[in-house]
């Protein structure tokens, strides 16, 4: 039971850990996405700044290249050409920056996708290991619970057999007690009848004995009266003695 409770606790802990792990993976991916986005923006800004400075320096060098002085009559034409040149430089710069930005964006996107794929693969492997561990623990827990259930069923079966035997023994004992009680009642009844018969026999014998005693006493009185009559002529002491005996 302790092992089953510990396995259940470990399984719940692993289940909670899996949920926390999924949440942590989501947080890591969101943080990585945010950091990559920030790095991408900073890289684009830095590269754009460097390219802009480089192109600006080149344009300034071209613009500052010493030229032969022209006559004043061509000043308006030179100003227009200068403006056209600046406009062309700005267009070229914008196109170059746009192209470079697209290239950098594609490169950063590829790096980001590659990093996400690698991290996803690593996390997938880690999650697969964790899932395998959780499945193993769940399998062991299920086996232990099945063993515990089988053992419990065996004990319940044994208890049921013991209860059946107890009920059978109890019913047998009750039947025997009922039989013994009935037999005791019959024995008591027979005993009371025997006692009544013995008592009646005893009373009849006592009555007979009393009758015999009465007859013997009467006979004794007759004999004594005869003896008294025969001994009246004897001395007074003997007569009084006989009278006292007769009275007794």
Image (spheres, rainbow, N blue to C red):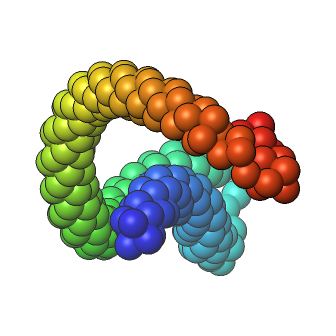
Q: Is residue 233 above or below residue 196?
A: below
| The quadrant where residue 212 appears | top left
| The quadrant where residue 137 appears | bottom left
Q: Residue at x 56, y 35 (%)?
A: 226
Q: Nearer the viewer, residue 65 or 238?
A: 238
The image position of residue 151, as x and y in percent, is 20, 61
Residue 175 seen by the camera: yes
| The quadrant where residue 55 appears | bottom right
The image position of residue 199, as x and y in percent, is 40, 27
Q: Residue at x 44, y 64 (%)?
A: 5
Q: Nearer the viewer, residue 246 or 48?
A: 246
The image position of residue 229, as x and y in percent, is 63, 35
Q: Nearer the viewer, residue 28 or 1?
A: 1
Q: Is residue 235 left or right of residue 246?
A: right
| Count of picture labels | 0
Residue 115 seen by the camera: no
Q: Quadrant of the N terminus?
A: bottom left
Q: Nearer the viewer, residue 107 or 184?
A: 184
Q: Quadrant of the C terminus?
A: top right
Q: Residue at x 78, y 47 (%)?
A: 239
Q: Is residue 227 left or right of residue 138?
A: right
Q: Residue at x 71, y 45 (%)?
A: 233
The image position of residue 45, as x and y in percent, is 62, 61
């Amino acid at each position: 039971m302790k092992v089953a409770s510990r396995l259940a606790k470990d399984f719940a802990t692993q289940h909670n850990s899996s949920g926390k792990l999924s949440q942590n993976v989501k947080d890591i991916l969101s943080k990585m996405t945010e950091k990559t986005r920030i790095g991408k923006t900073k890289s684009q800004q830095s590269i754009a700044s460097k390219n802009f400075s480089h192109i600006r320096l080149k344009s300034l060098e071209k613009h500052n290249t010493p030229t032969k002085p022209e006559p004043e009559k061509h000043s308006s034409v030179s100003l227009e050409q200068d403006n056209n040149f600046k406009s062309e430089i700005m267009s070229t710069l914008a196109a170059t920056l746009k192209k470079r930005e697209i290239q950098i964006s594609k490169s950063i996107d590829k790096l980001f996708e590659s990093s996400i794929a690698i991290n996803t693969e690593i996390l997938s492997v880690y999650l697969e290991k964790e899932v395998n561990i959780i499945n193993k623990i769940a399998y062991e827990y299920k086996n232990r619970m099945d063993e515990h259930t089988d053992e419990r069923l065996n004990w319940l079966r044994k208890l049921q057999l013991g209860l059946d035997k107890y009920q059978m023994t109890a019913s047998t004992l009750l039947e025997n007690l009922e039989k013994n009680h009935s037999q005791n009642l019959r024995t008591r009844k027979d005993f009371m009848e025997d006692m009544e018969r013995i008592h009646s026999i005893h009373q009849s014998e006592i009555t007979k004995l009393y009758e015999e005693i009465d007859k013997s006493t009467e006979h004794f009185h007759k004999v004594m009266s005869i003896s008294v009559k025969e001994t009246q002529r004897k001395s007074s002491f003997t007569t009084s003695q006989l009278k006292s005996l007769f009275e007794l």
